[in-house]
Amino acid sequence: MAYYSSDKTRWLEKDKNGLTRKDKLFKRQRIIELIRSYYKACQFFEAEIPLLVSGTSPDIAIQSFEVKDKYLTTSTEYHIKRMIAGGFDKVFTLTKNFREYEFDNYHNPEFTMLEWGRAHATLETIEHDVVNIITALCAEFYQNTDYFEYQNSNISIKTPWQTMSFQSVFYDYYGIVIPDDYDISETVLLAQKAGIEPDEIALNNPGLLLSVLLDEAIKKMGFSAPVLIKKWPSTMTSSAGTGADSRWTERTEIIIAGIEIADGFPFLQDQARQKLFFERANMNRVNNNLPAVVYDEKYLAMLKSGLCDGAGMALGIDRLCMLFTGAVDIKDVLCFAWDEL
């Protein structure tokens, strides 16, 4: 992590490209202005979602901050879908989220997230929103719509962007063959067949092994053009719709310069399936010595009454600002990071 000695120097020290943190914060302000302009032009409603919510995600990878009998919000996904079910066709939020992440170059426990949903839209339409935003930022800061520069890489944004399936990522980077009838319990055996010997912790936690291997592969992706990872195991996606084969789900994760920038999927409309995902996730938490959480019952009630088809996505604003300011530390695009409060 970057270190700044005091407020006298915090925002005025120059990086190797001659930019100060103050310069980057003004760029951040402009990035947010352009994003809001895009969604307003597309006639989205900007929703103001409370930061304190009564239910949270039980996903084992997400640790929520508890505040008395509520939680600081980790995502506005459920609330966006509730509003769409109630008659709002296009909704976006650009707000603070909170997760007990490890504090590092890409994570701050308080962060800014852009999330949006479109009723009756496909995932491809949502992906196109990201293309439009990145194109607008390139035009603003590089006076072109073909590429941008980040840490000595020229990243082309010409469409179509590169697409990889979850299975192809594991084969290309590790030689791991994940079959179509894959079950997550087989992860350790598949890794061992490819010559990878998991450590003692991962041996007993196939989900953790899967996440660790994926994270390491992502660090090597997206340095010449954005990469879209598609077709994910259902066990790794708790709120996405599935097709005929319930083991796989339609989902897109967007990687640029080794950084996960955005993650989206079609709406899951099946209330019983969503509740089962929540219950299994809570059980997984308990089995891994994590506290069970209260999940969002009002979201489940909405699903029971009916949610139209559609799709949505979440995009990390802080990481996006890193890409367009040349920052290698999330701290450089925040007014105050976690350790500066």
Image (cartoon, grey):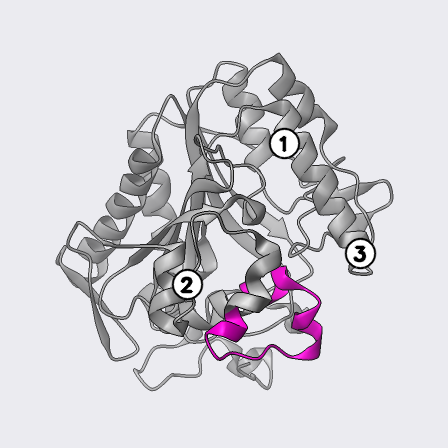
Q: Residue 274: which disc?
A: 1
> Please, what is the three-letter code of the amino acid marked with disc 2?
Val
Contact between labelled residues 1 and 3, with CB atoms less than 8 Å apart: no
Looking at marks 1 and 2 on the same chain, the residue that comes earlier in the sequence is marked by 2
Residue 90 horizontal/vertical position (percent) = 41, 25
Q: CA distance from mark 2 to mark 3?
A: 28 Å
Residue designated by label 3: 287
At x 66%, y 56%, the residue is: 99
Report the magenta residues as a range. 191-211
Left/right of residue 133 with respect to residue 262 in the rendered view: left
Looking at marks 2 and 3 on the same chain, the residue that comes earlier in the sequence is marked by 2
At x 44%, y 30%, the residue is: 244
Secondary element type, mark 1: helix
Residue 12, compared with residue 139, is above or below; it is below
Residue 306, compared with residue 47, is above or below; it is above
Q: Is residue 104 magenta?
A: no
At x 69%, y 31%, the residue is: 275
> Please, what is the three-letter code of the amino acid marked with disc 3?
Asn
Is residue 331 visible from the viewing direction of this image? no
Looking at marks 3 and 1 on the same chain, the residue that comes earlier in the sequence is marked by 1
Residue 238 horizontal/vertical position (percent) = 58, 41
Residue designated by label 2: 177
Q: Determine crowd level at label 3: few under 14, some 14-19, many 20+ residues with C-alpha closer than 10 A.
A: few
Is residue 177 visible from the viewing direction of this image? yes
> Please, what is the three-letter code of the amino acid marked with disc 1?
Gln
